[in-house]
Image (cartoon, rainbow, N blue to C red):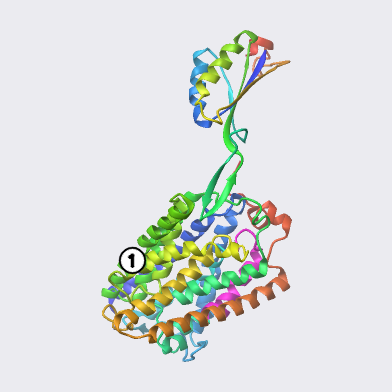
Amino acid sequence: MIDTGDTAWVLISAALVLFMTPGLAFFYGGMVRSRHVLAMLMQNIFAMGIISVIWSGIGYSLAFGGVGAFIGDLSHAFLSGADGTSGTIPTMAFVAFQMMFAVITPALITGATADRLRFASYAVLIAVWTLVVYVPVARWVWNPNGWIFSMGALDFAGGAAIHINAGIAALAVVLVIGNRRGHGSEAMPPHNLPFTVLGTGILWFGWIGFNAGSALAANGIAAQAVVNTHLAAAAGMLGWLAIERLKAGHATTLGAASGAVAGLVAITPCAGFVGGAAPLIIGGGAGIICYLALGLKSRFSFDDSLDVIAVHLVGGLVGTILLGLFADTGVNADGADGVLFGGGVELLIDQTVAALAVLAYSFIVTFAIAKVIDRLMGLRVDPVDEAMGLDQSQHAESAYQP
Amino acid sequence: MLLVTAVIKPFKLDEVKDALKQLGVAGMTATEVRGFGRQGGHTETYRGAEYRIDFVPKVELQLVVDDGAVDAVVDAIRTAAATGQIGDGKIWVTTVERLVRIRTGEEGPAAI
């Protein structure tokens, strides 16, 4: 039986989540140097093109069709038979909502690989990655037949399926392509932080649909998810700024933007399962921990250009693990109780297993995909094209006229 | 005829321009430039990583003046552009061999 309120909310949420991808484009685009900004915007909006087509073709069916624990089937290829109902909403509303998730997930990787990917190779990379990495992981985590779902681990809107997954994939691709030319010796400051702040605003706004839409209903859980999402972003901003002020001397605009996103990432798996002060602790904790994680890349000298690993991988881990402490069936009876709500360590163990499984699978498979593409067509631009800038070398355009 | 070139702090441009207009100077050219001198650069911090910015934004002002006016012009620029802080810039004067007004073809001091 279709509920019109639930349906309306999920449809609106699909549009909100769609808007996050151009938001991400501006968030990242502001942080790169001016001769690479169009390439960054392009990599992001291109995901809206190619991933949507792949999702409607076979992605949705492989993620949500059939009964397999690891992968679906092709029974809903080209969305055939997806015209029924799922719970209280049309299946097609769920298809649309999940399509936007599939679009933004590979786009998250582009921050780590900024300023050095060949465009054609990038297109192949995210197409293959979506089918071979994202689709199975989404299956495991969100489909009732999926093994992580059956095990009892919780992931409300994608802490493991999206943020840990894309974060560790970003590391794998960076290890294949290497660092930007001049990394470590040449200053590479952001060229337009106002873009980054604009992008943060769009992401924060869209994230309301991302998390609260994941309730798949217009109910109390969705309302709780809205509040949790917003509070985690707020606390994330404050946490990041506090430690940044202490350690680096200034509270920065980029810090405020980064902290808010870190809080949003961490609350994503928890949004519909926690309440009370939990979003403040999870978001604030993520702001501090993600800031401290920025040092990882220089420690291990990999060029995660825009800190996808520190923000998405680490933030996703923080949220996924902390859910094992803060989950509360008083908030959502379909969830579970974490350590602090009398549930013992069972959920915490399930959350850890889910996080590690996604980490290992995504890293190994992404590394292999990137290696093969690199061998077959070259994943990285040649040094002259990189120095000239990807805008000119990949797209024959300039963002700004002199 | 002399060419007066001054490199000044960007936010001082309007004050310098007003002071020169009061002297009766009819025109000048301002260019955004970057450079460093004793002031050196500064550091900016992005996500905890410090960047050394060596080239600081400045404005370079150029105007051609008659020999008799040069001291008053240099004084006016110096007074208006000074903050007393390091990085106030420099003024230098060079000779101009030939000056032509494109519209009329006038040459020399008449073209100033």
The chain that hosts pointer 1 is A
Q: Which of these two is toward me, A11 or A315?
A: A315
The quadrant of the picture occupied by the N terminus of chain A is bottom left
Which residue position holds label 1? A280
Which residue corresponds to the image point at 43% horizontal and 51% vertical from the top-left? A251
Residue type at tag 1: Leu
Left or right, A305 with respect to A352, comes to right
Disc 1 is placed on an element classified as helix
Can you give x and y, in whole percent of width and height, for residue A104 in the image?
49, 68
Can you give x and y, in whole percent of width and height, for residue A242 in the image?
40, 56
Q: Main secondary structure of the magenta part?
A: helix
The quadrant of the picture occupied by the C terminus of chain A is top right
Left or right, A55 with respect to A272, comes to right
Q: Which of these two is toward me, A37 or A231?
A: A231
Q: Which residues are magenta?
A: A113-135
Splitting the image into 4 quarters, where does residue A130 fall?
Answer: bottom right
Which residue corresponds to the image point at 51% horizontal and 26% vertical from the top-left? B84
Residue A259 visible in this rendered orientation of the protein:
yes
Residue that lies at the very extreme toward the bottom in this rendered image: A67
